[in-house]
Image (cartoon, rainbow, N blue to C red):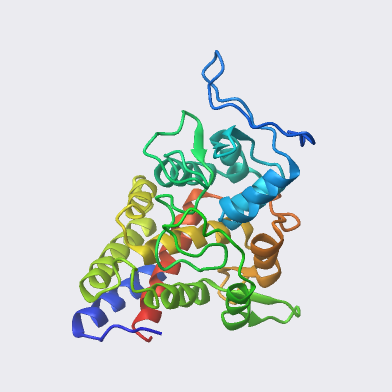
Amino acid sequence: MFMLNRSLPIVLATYALAVVTACASEDPGGSGGASGGKADGTVPELLLTTAQRDTLVHKGATCPFMRTAVNDKRVRIRGAIDKPLGDTGDVIHLGNAGGGDLGKVLEFFAHINHNRLNGPGGLTETPVPDNTFGIWFPGSQGAHPGHSGILMGDPGDVTSGRFTAERLTRLTGDYSTLYPDGKRYISREQIGAFIADNVGNDPASRGFDLAGMQALSTQLADLARRAAENDPNLLEDVLHLLVTGDDLVNSSGEFSLLFTRFADGTDVSGHPVISTGAIESLFRDGVFPAGWDQHPARAADWVWNTLAIAKSAILASWGF
């Protein structure tokens, strides 16, 4: 794993951060769909063939949450098959299932990262219609260097979507712990170390240098302090941190969604953990884990999980 040289400012920033953090049905015949809107301004729903849905699941929606939602027909697909769109309202509903408010975080990700028409033919500069998002992720603004490599190759290549079993096994085998119930679970600290390795091993990663890591440590410490003080503007500021082009933060926010929505256990400190079974169900099988929508997933918990994962990723990067 690539590590940055330690220095007194790094150690001090690490200490400060540590102290504060503690405080619709299938269409068998298929249709190409239409990209024009209805009279009320909505984009027509696209009825996918089985083959089209399979392609979108395995090559386009290269996020474990969205590929599973598409596979399970929980998100309506709109527009045209060469530039497919997801229904933003459906994504918000998925986030809020069980009584929470995580939907607004998912809405932000959709609006910021997937706001241009994209598809296997290439990314365009054409904005998506209201209440939709581009659901072909490779090549989009949300595809970034230093990612896990499980569901996508080159983030700039719209044709790079694919599942890589070896990458998933690396996560579930090397970054998990056997618990007394006989299952293996992944903690926020372990996912942070996984992110640090991914970002550190990709020369194209952004923000992974001495100055960038020092600045990020200071930002995270301040955000953690504000979280402890219940700052009402915290969510907005953490969300905006994700558009600064720092790939360690990008990955932390993405994996935080999984911990907030799909955590199925806790560690000895009461912090959320997620079983390797749940991870495999999402990444490999495209199936939601049992009971995932029977409890609330809250935006505030996403904030805490993001800060904790990012902190762990920084510490792992420095060899702590």
> Where's residue 32, x and y in %?
64, 32
> Where's residue 165, x and y in %?
64, 72
Tally of numbered tags? 0
| 57 horizontally vs 227: left or right | right
| 72 horizontally vs 196: left or right | right
| 300 horizontally vs 167: left or right | left
Identity of the residue drawn at 45% across and 33% down? 128
Name the residue nearer the viewer: 66 or 9. Answer: 66
Identity of the residue drawn at 38% across and 50% down? 239
Name the residue nearer the viewer: 52 or 265. Answer: 52
Quadrant where the N terminus sits is bottom left
| Residue 100 in sight from this viewpoint | yes
Identity of the residue drawn at 40% across and 60% down? 144
| 51 horizontally vs 148: left or right | right
Name the residue nearer the viewer: 17 or 205. Answer: 205
- Quadrant of the image occupied by residue 314: bottom left
> Where's residue 289, x and y in %?
72, 58
Identity of the residue drawn at 59% across and 32% down? 78
> Where's residue 61, x and y in %?
57, 51
Relative to residue 58, is residue 233 depicted above or below?
above
Extreme-front residue of the structure:
121
Quadrant where the C terminus sits is bottom left
